Image (cartoon, rainbow, N blue to C red):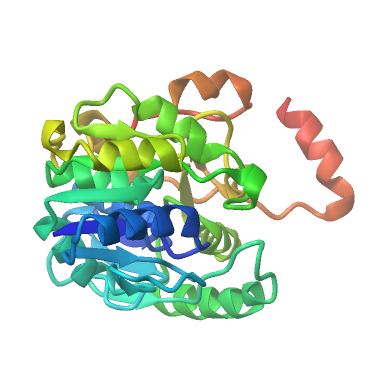
Amino acid sequence: MAVKRLMLVASGGGHWVQLSRLSPAFEGHKALYVTTMEGAEAPSGATPVAVVTDASRSHPASFAVLFAQMIWIIAKFRPDVIVTTGAAPGLVAIQVGKVLGARTVWIDSLANSERMSLSGKLARRYADLWLTQWPHLVEKYPNLSSFGAVL
Amino acid sequence: MILVSVGTQFPFDRLISTVDMWAVENGRTDVMAQTGPSGYTPRALKCFAMMSPDKFRKLQAEAELIVAHAGMGSILTALEFRKPIIIMPRDHTRGEHRNAHQSATAARFENTPGLYVVRDEAELLDRLNHLSDMVASQGVSRKAPEEFVSRLRAFIEEERPSSRVWTLPWRRNESSAAKR
């Protein structure tokens, strides 16, 4: 099996904790983690962690910076697959990544038990695999799947 | 040590000030609080806005009790470290978050052992005044369930090119109609 280049993206806090819980799925591949907080250590061994600016609806201007950073990171790392647990930085990563030819996975946060998050809804068009952690949401959205929860 | 944490996006001074008041009344000097962008001046709490995830994880491991907003990071980490945790969801009608998802999260975890949901300041104070009858949360592994991991791994390792995303704007309706 060919070793894949995996770019794993999550904002700090709960998104990062959820991505870390999935780290066994990435073992044996060449991974680059991307998050928003300085000083995050990759969950598995000596894997590099890149830091990008955080963006949210509350600070729309920061999206421009985030887009530039993601284009740079993706053009340099050339990931085969991008996996993200959200939020805004993950959305930008799979938007840019999709255009540059990566396969993309969106995993909506466990926090969104009643509906998909806003960034999750926007991610649908750019995600090859579009996941919720709440199986009861699957029938509410076309193309949505679930592999269960990270907990 | 008791650790209070409310995430980094928004202030949650309704929680911070209640715990501070309780700490003052009970002479507790061992309460640390991660406050985010807060405007509150504490009297007894040792406050900081945020810190790096690794250092913060060490604090979470040392704490005997965690008091937090209903954020997934706080909840999952408390479960991983088998810590009792009190959670008070942010109320979006008071502008404490963008939507009501924290109330839904609190409701989903309400019956989890070691996880104590409080709805307001009065319930929070009541919980803090009965610390001795709290139990530790049942530990969970630091890893996601095997089924999730193996299905995600299978997708990653599939040899398949990325599907095309660019559709000319004026052809978008046609292609989405074709998908249906």
Count of residue discs: 0
Q: Position of residue A53 (x, y in %)?
A: 50, 76
Q: Position of residue A101 (x, y in %)?
A: 53, 61
User: In screen coordinates, is B17 left or right of A125?
Assistant: left
Residue at screen point 57% across, 36% down: A116
Q: Is residue A73 above or below residue A147?
A: below
Q: Is residue B104 above or below residue A74?
A: above
Residue at screen point 16% across, 64% down: B30
Residue at screen point 48% across, 28% down: A145
Q: Position of residue B145 (x, y in %)?
A: 21, 32
Task: Determine the residue located farthest toward the front in the rendered image.
Answer: B25
Q: Position of residue A102 (x, y in %)?
A: 48, 58
In the picture, the quarter occupied by the C terminus of chain A is top left
Residue at screen point 24% across, 65% down: B32
Is A2 in front, or is A98?
A98
Task: Determine the residue located farthest toward the right in the rendered image.
Answer: B170
User: In screen coordinates, is B20 left or right of B77?
Assistant: right
User: In screen coordinates, is B92 left or right of B45?
Assistant: right
Q: Quadrant of residue B86?
A: top left
Is A50 in front, or is B16?
B16
Q: Quadrant of residue A31?
A: bottom left
Q: Is residue B113 above or below residue B43?
A: above
Is A93 in front, or is B101?
B101
Residue A22 visible in the snapshot: no
Residue A74 visible in the snapshot: yes
Is A75 in front, or is B83?
B83
